[in-house]
Amino acid sequence: MPQLDDVLARIDAGLEQERDELLGLAHRIHAHPEVRFEEVQASAWLTEALEARAFTVERGVGGLPTAFRARLEGRGSGPTVAVLCEYDALPGLGHACGHNVIATMGAGAGFALAPLMGELAGTLLVIGTPAEEGGGGKVTLLEAGVFDGVDAAIMIHPYKSSHPSMGTLAATRWDVSFRGVPAHAAMAPHLGRNALDAVRLAFAGIDALRQQVRDDVRMHAIVTDGGAAANIIPETASMNAIARARDGAYLFDDLAPRLENVFRGAALMTGTEVDLTASAAPYLEIVDNAPLEAAFTRHATRRGRSVTPYDMADGTGSTDMGNVSQAIPGLHGMLDIDDAALPHTAAFEVAAGSPRGDATVIDGAAVLAGIAAELFLDPDLMAQAKAAFAEATGR
Ligand SMILES: [Zn+2]
Ligand SMILES: [Zn+2]
């Protein structure tokens, strides 16, 4: 087997050769944002590019039309390493989470490793995971067995600074609809049962609950139906609510039942009926994996990035990568594309298509390819990642 230093030099050189094509792909996805489950073009462009580099591509895996799994076998047996691509945009904000950068960092790792796999022991997968923004694509793919046989799953998210991990919260959501009795709001209000009042009281109940929960909890909601006209007592009204906490145990066992009682209480108070639909794909918190994170820091530092530990006080989010990391050893590193802009803002959307975003596509591809190469070359690293996973999860 080749030496790691030699492999890394060839990864860097390969990415220089692929630079124009890879950045063209990043800009094309950035300019054509597609929201969750509608990433038809992004999925087609990524799979065509991987096929052109000798990957065997399965499209529509896990029953998700815009998902894919691209496979390249190495020389002899070794670990199966999956590099994950996200490529969905945000409604109204375009690629304000920078998933065009994620997609092309992942594909770029595939581009860089394709000419090398004949010398490496193991299997490289590039898995296209749709609908990270609220659709839980990875949860569906996990349940469908798309990750079966994967020894490690790695990805990088763009951010305002570079870190080997992301502080995450487990998250779940509810669609809540109330049904009351409509009535003329002036002529016969006493005959009505006001569904919008139930929504208002549910919001008030959430705010009261907020005082008696742990500091790490986040609860937020929007009204999705607030009635038809002010002179009709609303027969129906609905809301969408999200709750998050540092760990799924607290979120699902403690917080969720109390929040559901808020919705039921609002119905009871207003004489309406409530219909609660909890998310079928809640997001779990990320299981940290120190050996994979150390590999990230090595390779990102090698590419000139300044890597610091993630500061939980800096803010936390949720990702369906958490679910993957609960099932197999996983890495969710972060590389900077801006000094200040945060995901889900217009400024971050600009950064995701900027020269600095481009540099991060290339560096991120090199980092992911470097970690994968190390896993193929060094059975000890793979064993350490598995041991860290076993210790954290008891599996
Ligand atoms: Zn996002
Ligand atoms: Zn994101």
Image (tube, helix red, strand yellow):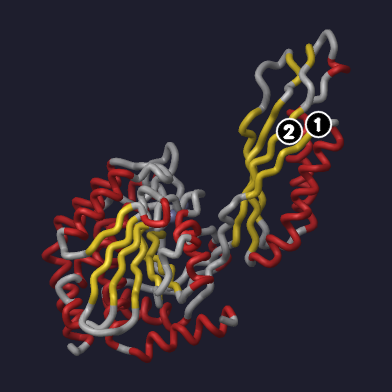
Q: Is residue 377 left or right of residue 141?
A: left
Label 2, residues with CA under 10 Å away: few <14, some 14-19, many ≥20: many
Residue at disc 1, secondary structure:
loop
Residue 272 numbered tag: 1
Q: Verify CB contact (< 8 Å) between mark 1 and mark 2.
A: yes
Residue 29 vertical placement versus 292 (above, below): above
Specify the quarter for ligand 2: bottom left
Question: Is any part of residue 360 visible from this angle?
Answer: no
Give coordinates of residue 320: x percent, y percent.
50, 59
The kind of residue on which mark 1 rests is: Thr
Please report the residue visible at 34 percent of the width from the left and 89 percent of the height from the top: 379
Question: Is any part of residue 76 visible from this angle?
Answer: yes
Residue at disc 2, secondary structure:
strand
Image quadrant where one finds the C terminus: bottom right
Instruction: State how far apart marks 1 and 2 are (Cα).
Output: 6 Å
Q: Is residue 135 left or right of residue 191?
A: left
Residue 178 numbered tag: 2
Q: Residue furthest top?
A: 187
Please report the residue visible at 44 percent of the width from the left and 50 percent of the height from the top: 131
Tell me where residue 102 sits by quadrant: bottom left
Residue 346 vertical placement versus 304 (above, below): above
Image quadrant where one finds the N terminus: bottom left
Please report the residue visible at 48 percent of the width from the left and 78 percent of the height from the top: 289
Residue 157 vertical placement versus 228 (above, below): below
Give coordinates of residue 190: x percent, y percent.
88, 17
Tell me where residue 155 sits by quadrant: bottom left
Looking at marks 1 and 2 on the same chain, the residue that comes earlier in the sequence is marked by 2
Give coordinates of residue 21: x percent, y percent.
15, 55
Of the pair 224 and 31, the residue shown nearer to us: 224
Please report the residue visible at 44 percent of the width from the left and 88 percent of the height from the top: 384
Give coordinates of residue 233: x percent, y percent.
76, 19
The kind of residue on which mark 2 rests is: Phe
